Each structure stands twice: as C-alpha cells, then as structure tokens.
Image (spheres, helix red, strand yellow):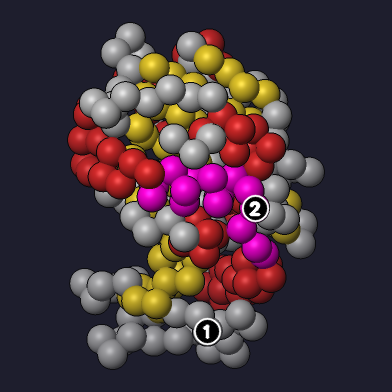
Amino acid sequence: MLTVFPTDRIFILAGAGVSAESGIPTFRGAGGLWRNYRIEEVASREAWHRDPRLVWEFYSMRRRVALSAKPNPAHFALAKLEKALQECLFVCTQNVDGLHELAGTRNVVHMHGELFKSRCDSCSRPPFDDTNLCEPPAEVPRCECGGRIRPHICWFGEVPFELDRIYRALDQSTIFMAVGTSGVVEPAASFVAHVAGRARTIYVGPEEPANASSFTECYLGKAGEVLPDLLGCL
C-alpha cells in the first residue's frame, strides 16, 4: 500500500489505459484506424479544414461510445483518493470521456480536452457543454459569429490545455504516478522526467510504458485491479 505523509503532494497522470478498461478504444492498436482512416486524418486542424463533417462523424461516434461506458474501479479509486487528500491531489488526464467525473472526482485537468464540450473555431467564445451531436450533423453547426462549432479536443499538432497549471503542480509534487499511459505521447511522456530525482515516481499499467526507465516503481497489471489495493483508503 502507498504510504503518504501530510506534506506529500501527489500528481496523477491518467492515460488511455484507464479508459480502455471501461471499453473506450485507444485507437493506438490495430493500426490506429477508424473506418480505414488513420486517426491523424480525422483528428487534426488539416482534417477539420478539409472535411469538417467527417471529423464530426468521428467525434459523434466517440460520444456514443463514451455515453455507454461506465467508470471502472481505477476511476473510483482516484475519486476516493481525492476525498482523502483534497487539495494535496492533482489529477491530470489525457482522456476526454468524462469518466473521472462520473466516478466522483471533482477537480480534473483535461489536458487533451473534453469530449462533451464544443467551441467555436473562429472566435473567443468559451468552450460550452454539448451533449448533442451523438449523430453526425447534416450541416456543421455554426457559432453566432459565423465560425464553425468544433469539438473541444486537442488535436494532433495543437498545444495541450492548461500546461502552465500542470507544470506548477508538477513542480510542487512529491509523488508522481502515471496510470495506464503509453509513455510516447508528448508532452505528457516527459512529465516523469520533469520530476525525476526529486519526486517518487510510480507507474501502474498492464505493460511497461516506453519511458519505464524513468520510474522508480512499476506495478504491472490492470489499473482497476492494482490501484484500489495500492491506494487503499489512505
């Protein structure tokens, strides 16, 4: 069981493996294909400008999948950890499906965006909750300014959200734990290197990540099976 002291601050990086245990496809297996399209072909600015309706077809499918998914024990373990540690826990997720919140975690930083939010591709209107478009629209919806409404997702080639806040939390952390991450997606793959030598670094997942050598502790197994025992009730 993980021992935590009152002075500790824990940074959790949740990767696609956490959501995969709830049935959310990672799109990194099987060649990363959707309807014979490489994911980069439907999740980029270039794709949006080339064929926005195709992009919405992809994200409508993802919304349908996410709506049918349920949080797994890993999500619930992190929610319980937040209740125990309050502001001493920082949860940063690469996942966009909202399952952390469904499990009860209140403060989650979504560095890659949120599937059930949309925003204008032209004006500064803030992202807004959007549970519609679970079926692809006949016409791409428009903002009042005339711009097109796009998914609030960090696409390939775009800068992840809230990096300043994330790095401040990394600098304050004494324990860094990556859960279900591949260790290849930047900049998240470099977070462990950012804290190495100063913080305790822990990996939890079914197989070693590409950056396994950067961790001082590795617990191999499904996050939903490992995390509840590792975290206990703290």
Q: Position of residue 58 (x, y in %)?
A: 63, 67
Residue that carries the numbered disc 2 in the rendered image: 72
Residue 79 is one of the magenta-drawn residues:
yes
Identity, as a three-letter code, of the amino acid under mark 2: Asn
Foreground pick, 192 / 184? 192
Q: Is residue 56 above or below residue 233?
A: below
Q: Is residue 47 above or below residue 203?
A: below
Q: CA distance from mark 1 to mark 2?
A: 25 Å
Instruction: Quadrant for residue 57, please give it.
Output: bottom right
Instruction: Quadrant for residue 91, please give it.
Output: top left
Provide the residue span drawn in magenta. Answer: 69-83
Residue that carries the numbered disc 1 in the rendered image: 132
Judged by depth in the image, the label closer to the viewer, 1 or 2, is 2
Q: Is residue 176 above or below residue 108?
A: above
Q: Quadrant of the C terminus?
A: top left
Q: Position of residue 130 (x, y in %)?
A: 45, 79
Q: Position of residue 217 (x, y in %)?
A: 53, 15
Identity, as a three-letter code, of the amino acid under mark 1: Asn
213 vs 165, left or right, is right
Residue at 74 percent of width and 41 percent of height: 29
Instruction: Say if residue 99 shows up in the picture.
Output: yes
Residue at 70 percent of width and 48 percent of height: 21
